[in-house]
Amino acid sequence: MNIFLRLMKYGVKYKKLFFIGITLSFLVSIFNAVTLSTLKPIFDVYGQGVEKPFQIQIQEGEWDLLLRGGRYEELKKLINDYDVYQLKKEWINSLSQEEMHLPLKTWEAFSYFLSLAKLKINLITIAYNPFKLIVMLSIGILPIYLLKLLCLLGSVYFLSATGLNMVKDIRTDLYNKLIDLPLGHFVKEKSGVWMSRVINDVVLISDVMANDIRVSISNLFIVITHLMLLAIINSKLLVISLIGVPLLLWPVNYFARKIKSITRNEQSRLADLNGHIHEMIAGVRVIRAFGMEEYEKSRFKKINDMLRNEGFKYRLNNTIGPSLVEFTSAFIIAGLLVYGASQIAGGELTSGSFFTFLFTLLMVLSPLKQLATWYNLMNRMNVAGQRIFELMDEDVPIVTPEIPVELKKIKKSIDFKHVSFHYKPGDRDVLKNLNLQIPVGSTVALVGHSGAGKSTFVDLIPRFNDCTSGEILFDGINIKNLSLINLREKIGIVTQEVFLFNASIRENIAYGQESLDIKEIEKAARLAFAHDFIMELPNGYDTLIGERGFMLSGGQRQRLSIARALLKDPEILIFDEATSALDTRSEKLVQKAIKRMVKNRTTFVIAHRLSTVYESDMILVFKDGKIIETGTHDELLKKSGEYKSLYDLQFQDV
């Protein structure tokens, strides 16, 4: 229920649309009940002939209610003026004053209201010839049908608009949450699983909110208004019909619980399928290189079969519940037919009243069956909502402070004071009590074996992760006190694994700055030694480069990444293994581009190839999360420590 209420909160801003849709839906059910009520005079005329006037049957107890409600004069006029009530004349004329002034009980108010409605209708219709009344009703019902159609279209428009707007907001919030989550979350799950949350789970909610809720609201109003109509026609028959309601509801509740469990499994399998497909597309070269096509097909078949099985279970259970509702309702109808026949034969019920009651009851049973289906869909929506809110409720520890400090330019230094970091509480520290001061404009190289903590260290600077103890300062200001935008606009990052978008070269270089002039984009490309190869492409800067830029070579992608960072004109540059995957020629071009970039900027360079760090102002040697050596290339060689060992290992064959 909490999940449903949280989903419904998204409708608050669209409450006007919702209430207009609700009102129109209610009017549809009212008009439907009115059109059904016209069946009674038609059935009565056909059953009794045109001699008898049309009258709604007033039951024995209802005469007494009307009398005690102060309707003696109206009753007397109806009974004495028309022969149809011949049997009631002796009763009305023999009443004592005490019988006429007995008070109504509080609980009799609703029954009295229904009885009064019957009396008023009878007083109007008794004066008309039954055949003329049918003609009048047939003509009068046409505009009601038109109004019903217009209201139906209106309810579809307003309620569907409400539902779709709610789904749009849910999807937006989910995407915004996803883009703000810490990087560690994206390592835990496959990309396809995250995509499934945003797409498949939201689609399931969309189906319910945009369509099924509208249908269910209409059905609910039909049930309410038509039950009132049944009470007006014959309350005794209604009470008998309601005895079978628990029998109708049992299968709904039983199968709904099963469907909730099935839906949870189905959505999980669907997420697995999306994850597998995304993984296959991203790793298709590796799959083919290792000849693992058949293995991947068998993995897909296994997941696909499990998804098929869960889908089949859902459709089977979703069909059985409503079908059992229909089956049990057949017993109610059969019982009513037997009872109604005996009442008509005994003169206690007119054929018109009975058949109108029967048709109206059938109109109620159909929405009840659909409500059973809707209840199942609600359980599916509840499961999808649960999965969505699990993601939305994830803690986002890295946020902009309420009142951030504005830092226009770093003028002095970047300081690391007692900085430690671990990924999860209880885990060992990946970085351990680091203390460091880096003057602005310095080029700092980070070296060490894989897993020593180099990449984790530089990830703390743009706050991809926050240090778990200690602080990082820009000119004495803790970076946690800066807004994330203010902090990250000062930093440009070039990594080994370049990510380019499936767009044009122009759009990739100017990412986030689409309004820039082409001359500025070309200038950045020239500085990155990318302009020449760009101009050799079919459409120059407007050439589309495909998924992740795979239409380009590794060196070309890297140079575009450098151009993108240059165009940002950051104060701090981070190169994370930027040349390690390149061939010699591409590496030289990228190195030239990097040399141009680092002028007058504070630069952090992570490199396994020590040949790329000789000219650094400072080299930090990492081991087991600690900085064990600091100095220039020449200074560290003289120390004959860890750096000297790494150097000798790389150049022992030279």
Image (cartoon, rainbow, N blue to C red):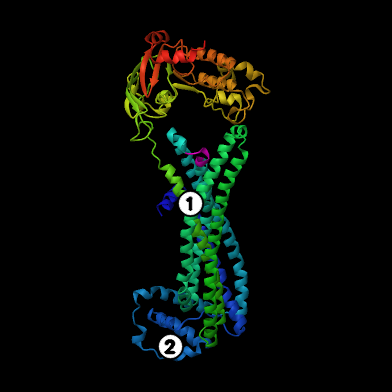
Circles 1 and 2, Cβ within 8 Å, touching? The answer is no
Q: Position of residue 423 (x, y in %)?
A: 38, 32
- Which residue is farthest right? 538
**In-image side of 501 versus 15 (left or right):** right
Compared with 514, 333 (above or below) is below
Quadrant location of residue 75? bottom left
Q: Amino acid at mark 2?
A: Ile
Sequence-first tag of 1 and 2: 2
Q: Amino acid at mark 1?
A: Arg
Q: Which residue is mark 1?
A: 264
Residue located 58% across and 74% down the image:
39
* Secondary structure mostly taken by the magenta-highlighted segment of the chain: helix
Residue located 43% across and 89% down the image:
91
Quadrant location of residue 96? bottom left
Element carrying mark 2:
helix
Tell me the CA gap for discs 1 and 2: 66 Å
Element carrying mark 1:
helix
Task: Tell me, yes or no, if residue 11 can be seen here.
Answer: no
The magenta stretch spans which residues? 189-194
Q: Residues within 10 Å of mark 2 (few under 14, many from 20)?
A: some
Near-viewer residue (334 or 11): 334
In the image, residue 191 lies in the stretch drawn in magenta: yes
Q: Which residue is mark 2?
A: 92
